[in-house]
Amino acid sequence: MTQRGTLGVAVIGTGRMGADHVRRIDQVISGAHVSAVVDIDAERAKHLADGIDGCTAYTDPSAAMAADGVDAVLIASPGPAHEAALLTAFEHDLPVLCEKPLTPDAASALRVMEAEQRLGRRRVQVGFMRRFDAEYMKLKALLDSGQLGRPLMLHNRHRNAASPPGFTTEMLINDSVVHEMDVTRWLLDQEITAVTVLRPTPSGNAPEGVRDPQLVLFETDGGAIVDVEINVNCGFGYQVKAEAVCERGTARIGEEQSLVTDMAGRWGGTIAQDFVERFADAYDRQVQAWVDATRRGEVTGPSVWDGYATAAVCEAGVRAQSEGGRVAVELIERPAFYL
């Protein structure tokens, strides 16, 4: 470690997420500093680097990872570029926080998993930030305590005000429901074995060609049933809610018990407008946990196995969208390395 004994991080990708992570490391969390930023847009990378003392801009991830002062890597580039960046990080034996998806499909995720196993130790934490959200953490602790008995069902709602330009029907699964896939596996400590997708008549708010909203159903190897309302053009804000139905009670999160006003014949509060606002604390907590673990010489949090498993569930979900009916999830046996 270099500058003031802190962890030198190379951030790969300086789009919306990457730039936000640069800000987070530079201004919010402790124990790390941004030593390099990487983007194919040289001007964008240079603009970010110029605002941070001791930070260098690169267009080549390999060059950044080989640079002095780089102790760890945060990958926030588009998903198709993740595999190459991860394998390069392995060559340099650098710990990585990789934004989801680990890779865009199960086959490439499996290649990353095999490469990490050849190293003989974990190097990657996958950026499933909901695991670091305060409400989700409370729900996880409650379910793990056994106080409510065995989970039977999990109801989820995932709504966005509007989908961005270029959004496709497949992205409902790969970019949105992927989060419910991970939290289902984490909350229940079960694997998803099958996916079914039901599609009502599309909303008038949905762009042409996008089949939104949808109801996605998961079956798990522990016998639970999980449903996800995915609605990315609801028109009013960003909402993520979950309710666990168990043998001896239920537990809900995302009820937005924040400031409520009564005035001028109306009552109400505010609704977050996007995921960055809703999960700001979770992102901060996630990166801080990664930095703390890395400085201890450890890798914690969601693993490459978690990235692979969600990629496999996504593939089943996209098939269920296009083919209809129930689609089984195809998973290899979990290696002892990830137990």
Image (tube, rainbow, N blue to C red):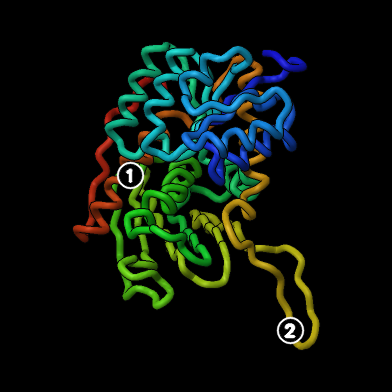
**Residue lying farthest bottom?**
265
Quadrant placement of the C terminus: top left
Quadrant hosting residue 20: top right
Q: Is residue 329 left or right of residue 286?
A: left
Disc 1 target residue: 313
Q: Which residue is found at the position 43% from the left and 26% from the top? A: 85
Count of residue discs:
2
Closer to us: 192 or 51 = 51
Using the image, determine if residue 317 lies above or below residue 265.
above
Q: Secondary structure at mark 2?
A: strand
**Could you tell me the amino acid type at mark 2?**
Arg
Q: Which residue is found at the position 31% from the left and 25% from the top? A: 111
Q: Secondary structure at mark 1?
A: helix
Quadrant hosting residue 53: top right
Q: Residue 333's spot in the image, x, y percent? A: 29, 28
- Residue 253 visible in the shown view: yes
- Residue 145 visible in the shown view: no
Disc 2 target residue: 266
